Image (tube, rainbow, N blue to C red):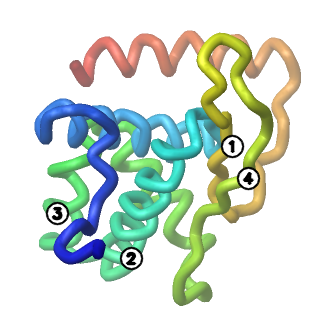
C-alpha cells in the first residue's frame, strides 16, 4: 500500500532534496528546457507547476511564496514578467516531461523537462554573447 507516501525521496535527506529541486526549478525557468533523470523530472514537474500556479496570482504574498524556492532575483523577476503572462490562459499542465534516452553508465532514464511557453526569438551571435556576459555578471551580484 502507498499510504502517506506523497513524494519520491530520491535517496536524499529533506534539505538536500529541497535545495536540489529548487536549483532544478531555477534552471528550468532560466533556460526553459533542461535534461535530468526521469525521477527528478517527475518531482520537478510537480514543483514547477505548483510554483507557476501560485505565481499566477501575482500579488505580494505570491511573490514571497515563490521567493522561498526561487532565490535568484533575476530568475524570480523573469518568472513574473516573461513566463507567467504566457501561461495566464492555461489552467494546469505548464510543463512537459519526455523520456529521451538511457544513460550508459548506470542505466538511468534521462528525460527532458520543458515549459510550454513560446520560445523567445533567437538573437544574433554578438547579442547572444553579450547577453551571456550580462547574465554572468547579474548572477554574481545576486549571490
Per the model, the C-alpha gap separating discs 2 and 1 is 21 Å
Find the distance from the CA under tag 1 to the CA under tag 4: 5 Å
Task: Please tell me which of labels 4 and 3 falls first in the chain.
Answer: 3
- Counting from the top left corner in percent of width and height, residue 53 is at 38, 76
Query: Measuring 36% from the left and 59% from the top, which residue is drawn there?
Result: 47
Identify the residue at image location x=60%, y=18%: 106
Badge nearest the viewer, 2 or 4: 4
Residue depicted at 62% across the width and 71% down the height: 86
Q: Is residue 58 above or below residue 32?
A: below
Image position of 87 with respect to 99: above or below: below
CB within 8 Å, label 1 to label 4: yes
> What residue is shown with label 3?
65
Q: Residues within 10 Å of mark 3 (few under 14, many from 20)?
A: few
Q: Earlier in the sequence, mark 1 or mark 4?
A: 4
> How far across and down, in percent of the image, does residue 31 sit?
60, 37
Q: Is residue 60 left or right of residue 29?
A: left
For the residue labelled by badge 3, is the local secondary structure a helix, a strand or a loop?
helix
Query: Residue 126's image quarter?
Result: top right
Name the residue at the front extreme: 1
Q: Nearer the viewer, residue 90 or 131?
A: 90
- Mark number for residue 53? 2
Q: Is residue 10 above or below residue 60?
A: above
Q: CA distance from mark 4 to mark 3?
A: 28 Å
| Sequence-earlier tag: 2 or 3 | 2
Q: Which mark is residue 42?
A: none
Instruction: Identify the residue under disc 1.
Output: 112
Q: Nearer the viewer, residue 2 or 112?
A: 2
Amino acid at each position: 500500500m502507498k499510504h502517506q507516501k506523497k513524494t519520491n525521496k530520491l535517496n536524499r535527506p529533506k534539505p538536500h532534496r529541497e535545495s536540489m529541486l529548487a536549483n532544478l526549478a531555477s534552471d528550468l525557468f532560466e533556460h526553459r528546457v533542461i535534461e535530468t533523470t526521469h525521477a527528478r523530472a517527475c518531482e520537478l514537474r510537480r514543483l514547477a507547476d505548483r510554483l507557476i500556479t501560485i505565481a499566477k496570482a501575482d500579488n505580494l504574498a505570491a511573490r514571497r511564496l515563490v521567493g522561498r524556492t526561487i532565490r535568484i532575483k533575476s530568475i524570480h523577476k523573469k518568472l513574473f514578467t516573461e513566463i507567467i503572462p504566457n501561461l495566464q490562459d492555461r489552467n494546469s499542465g505548464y510543463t512537459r516531461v519526455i523520456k529521451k534516452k538511457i544513460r550508459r553508465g548506470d542505466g538511468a532514464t534521462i528525460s527532458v523537462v520543458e515549459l510550454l511557453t513560446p520560445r523567445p526569438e533567437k538573437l544574433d551571435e554578438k547579442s547572444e554573447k553579450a547577453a551571456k556576459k550580462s547574465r554572468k555578471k547579474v548572477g554574481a551580484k545576486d549571490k
